[in-house]
Amino acid sequence: MGVFAIRLPDVGEGIAQAELTEWHVKPGDIVREDDVLADVMTDKATVEVPSSASGKVLELGGDVGDMIPIGAVLIRIEVEGEGNEKERPEAQKAAEPVEVTESAPETVDVSSTQPPPAQVQRTNGTKPLASPSVRARAREEGVDLRQVPGSGPAGRISHADLDAWIASGDIRQGAVTRGRNTGVEEVRVVGMRRKIAEKMAVSNRQIPHITIVEEVEMAALEDLRAALNAKYKGERPKLTLLPFLMRAIVEAVREQPELNGRFDDETGVIHRHGGVHIGIATQTPHGLNVPVVHHAEAGSLWDNAAEITRLSEAARDGSIKREDLSGGTITITSLGPLGAIATTPIINHPELAIVGINKMQVRPVWDGQQFQPRTMMNISCSFDHRVIDGWDAAVFVQKLKSLLENPAMLFVEG
């Protein structure tokens, strides 16, 4: 038998390290060649790392949340033959899992209903120690980890402990506790959530925001959208509000090109772009992504609608490419049906502006003589006040309002 070390491969041009976001295996597992071992993240793209050998997992090269250098050992596997490591330090050998014994609860036979040995009972209010994968599995199984004895150091709960607890049938899903819950769970911010946190911190720290909120009457646009969808049903992509708003942004920045760009904080240079590359903030199971519709100025309503669908689906299923997440010059954000009356969107650094869509609803509007029911929607637009004056911001917002309230103007060649 030999040891085969699998190193973190080069996952992108110029990338020196990647964040370990999830393990799909644990020591003692048997893996086959091409099985997915772990997920790593660089930039905003998550990459699966497959196994290049078959065998038993001996040790993992890091914890979830660690930054792993390209070329560093990610995992070691025991394989048939010599492997690719002739000799290993004693400390690494000591870390290898051993055969199932009273002192090795991590590889306990889960067919037994007996709990692993050397389990540690926690006192009330003590946080159960467990890896993210154990916590996720416990949630799926409906297991309260506070009830599960842990056999690891300091009572850490392993997959084997969880297996034994489930096998015992003592899940206690219906238990009701009336006393105070004094437990505190520590959740490490990793992966996509960490990237979002860093991005938002930079945007909020670097950019002095000015936000303008304006009411827009949407009846004409909604009538046009419904008519076009009915006319081309089954022939063309369904139109949502977004393609119309994108067209309005294209027309508005044609008159104010200074808003369609990116600001380099270090050099103090604004890069104004001819092409309008619109980011669409998209909620995914892993957090917020901002895929970019490049050259929105060159696409029709249906072209842009199809591209929005493609990008949002790829973002949600994790297949989106790095180039689809970069190069934006202005962003649209929306909370959809959960939207409020107004929001204060944070600019996607280093862009200069962001357009927020709020809830569309029927409101009473005074027409000079009486209140009339009108389909209204507020737009909330934020601007980088270092380089965009309040007057210019207001002009942009009023241009969007005029185009959305008079959608025929969206199709007039300028």
Image (tube, grey):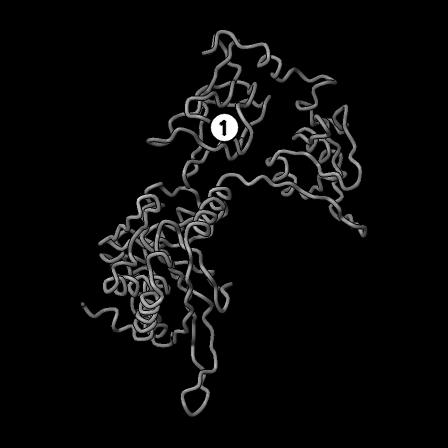
**Where does label 1 land, which residue?**
37
Q: Left or right: where does residue 232 sit relative to residue 316?
A: left
Q: Left or right: where does residue 396 sit relative to residue 91?
A: left
Q: Left or right: where does residue 289 sit relative to residue 130?
A: left
* Residue 40 image offset from top left, x and y in percent: 46, 33
Q: In this picture, is 21 found above or below 351?
A: above
**Is label 1 in a helix, a strand or a loop?**
strand
Out of 138 and 64, give the one closest to the viewer. Answer: 64
Q: Amino acid at mark 1?
A: Leu
Q: Residues within 10 Å of mark 1 (few under 14, many from 20)?
A: many
* Residue 33 image offset from top left, x and y in percent: 45, 22
Out of 32 and 301, give the one closest to the viewer. Answer: 301
Q: In this picture, is 294 found above or below 44?
A: below
Asked which quadrant contains residue 227, the reply is bottom left
Q: In this picture, is 181 found above or below 108?
A: below
On the rendered image, what quadrant is the C terminus found in? bottom left
* Residue 389 image offset from top left, x and y in percent: 34, 63
Out of 244 and 36, give the one closest to the viewer. Answer: 244
Q: Residue at x 32, y 46 (%)?
A: 264
Could you tell me how many numbered marks the image carries? Answer: 1
Out of 315 and 45, give the one closest to the viewer. Answer: 45
* Residue 232 image offset from top left, x and y in percent: 29, 66
Q: In this picture, is 302 found above or below 377?
A: above
Looking at the image, which residue sits at the far bottom? 369
